[in-house]
Amino acid sequence: MPLSDRLVRWGGARLSRRMTRAMPVLGLVVAAATLGATMRRKGFFRGALDMAFVGAAKNVVELARGRDFVPDVRRT
């Protein structure tokens, strides 16, 4: 295996590790941006209510399915 291939694999593995650590923060940013956009479009109260129902609907569907849409990562 050429050295360049090894460097690409090493860099990809390192980047994926960093991204998995940053994923909860990125999810929070996306949720906050979505909440902000919904509240601007629908108003404060109705926007917050809409986001609450979206979250509740997701939880109900996950409860009915018996598992998460995105399963937890198993660390050994």
Image: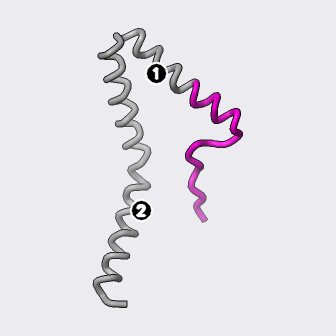
Q: Is residue 74 above or below residue 24?
A: below
Mark 1 or mark 2, which is nearer to you? 1
The disc at residue 51 is 1
Query: As shown in the figure, which amino acid type bears the numbered disc 2?
Result: Arg
The residue at 41%/62% (across/down) is 17
- What SS does tag 2 mark? helix
Residue 30's spot in the image, x, y percent? 36, 36
* Rendering colour mode: one colour
Q: Which residues are magenta?
A: 57-76
Sequence-first disc among 1 and 2 = 2
The disc at residue 17 is 2
The residue at 53%/20% (across/down) is 53
Q: Is residue 49 above or below residue 65?
A: above
Q: Of residues 43 and 74, which is closer to you in this image? A: 43
Residue 61's spot in the image, x, y percent? 63, 32
Pointer 1 with pointer 2, Cβ within 8 A:
no
- 36 in magenta: no
> How many angstroms separate mark 1 from mark 2 (CA)?
31 Å
- What SS does tag 1 mark? helix
Residue 32's spot in the image, x, y percent? 36, 29
Q: Is residue 20 above or below residue 47?
A: below
